[in-house]
Image (spheres, rainbow, N blue to C red):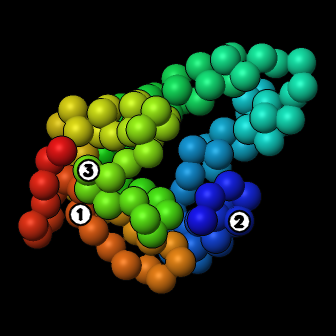
Amino acid sequence: MHGKEFKVIAQTYAAQHGLKSIEDYLEGTEWTPFDYRKANDVPEADKKKFWDHASQAMAELSSGTVYVLLPKEITVGNFYRSSVWADVEWEALKKNTKVTAVIYVNPENGDKQYFKGGPGHKMQ
């Protein structure tokens, strides 16, 4: 599951469990994601650059336990290549010494897997 359908499931899970997404932090700022994504006059390369920078900043400023909501087909070492998660966020979270654990949550069923820290973790 990808795209809008997954986004709705992930946002619902996050709201029900007191988690926040990068979009929650940007909401109400001049960088409101919904408006930026809809901007037809912004080239796709610029949109990607924006999300790469915003994602890296969030990962670098994170601390403690970080929860990542990804589709069920994603596992440690099985990331979508060339995605913001694989190329930017995960790399920054691995290097962030203030992050003690990164836990993948499948918002469709609540299953959890440690990406960093915790029992049986593997650094990829």
Classed neighbour count for the residue bearing mark 2: other residues with Cα under 10 Å, few (<14), some (14–19), many (≥20): few
The picture places residue 2, in percent across and down from the top left corner, at 62, 58
**Which residue is tagged 2?**
5
Q: Quadrant of residue 36?
A: top right
Could you tell me which secondary element the residue under label 1 belongs to?
strand
Q: Kindly indicate the quadrant of the structure image that contains residue 119.
A: bottom left
Asked whether residue 123 appears in the rendered view, the answer is yes
Q: Secondary structure at mark 2?
A: helix
Q: Which mark is residue 77?
A: 3
Label 3 vs 2, first from the N-terminus: 2
Give the image location of residue 86, x and y in percent.
39, 39
Residue 114's disc is 1
Report the number of discs: 3
Q: Is residue 6 above or below residue 77?
A: below
| Drawn side of residue 18 relative to residue 29, left or right | left
Residue kind at label 2, given as amino acid type: Glu
State how far apart marks 3 and 1 are (Cα): 12 Å
Q: Quadrant of the N terminus?
A: bottom right
Which amino acid, by three-letter code, is at mark 3?
Answer: Gly
